[in-house]
Amino acid sequence: MIVRIMGEGQVRLADGHFTELNKLDDELLSEMESGDESGFRRTLAALLDKVRELGEPLPDDALEPSELILPGPDATLDEVRQMLSDDGLIPG
């Protein structure tokens, strides 16, 4: 799956990594619902770091359609809230 981190670029991520990422996504959703700004910041950073760690960066000139778009590290709670689906940021 091709994942875009807003403001950074794209990575190719194997489907097998989504179980681990969904745990962070669930934690992020819970922190957003409770208004835990510091927890939100920490978990968003951990989620993006994990995507960077597990993903294979695509070249900057690659024009692949992104199947999943994640907020950048500076995104606010409100900005991320607008990006959410019922499953969080990551479906599944």
Image (spheres, helix red, strand yellow):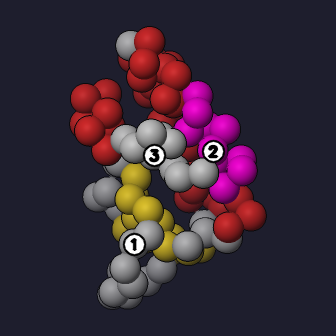
Q: Which residue is mark 3?
A: 89
Residue for point 50% across, 42% down:
87
Residue annotated with mark 1: 66
Horizontal side of residue 13 vs 86, given as left or right: right
Chain-order first, disc 1 or disc 2: 2
Whether residue 46 is visible to the viewer of this picture, yes or no, is no
Query: Quick one: SS at disc 1?
Result: loop
Type of amino acid under label 2: Asn
Element type at mark 2: helix
Residue 20 percent coordinates (x, y): 71, 47
Asked which quadrant contains residue 13, the reply is bottom right
Closer to the camera, 92 or 10?
Answer: 92
Give the image location of residue 77, x and y in percent: 31, 27
CA–CA distance between discs 2 and 3? Answer: 9 Å
Q: Nearer the viewer, residue 52 or 19?
A: 19
In the rendered structure, which amino acid carries the disc numbered 3?
A: Leu
What segment carries the magenta color? 18-27
Disc 2 or 3, which lies upstream in sequence?
Answer: 2
Measure the C-alpha gap from mark 1 to mark 2.
Answer: 18 Å
| Above or below, 81 relative to 91 | above
Mark 3 or mark 1, earlier in chain: 1
Left or right of residue 53: residue 57: left
> Would you call the spot at circle 1 few (<14 residues within 10 Å), some (14-19), or many (20 or more)?
some
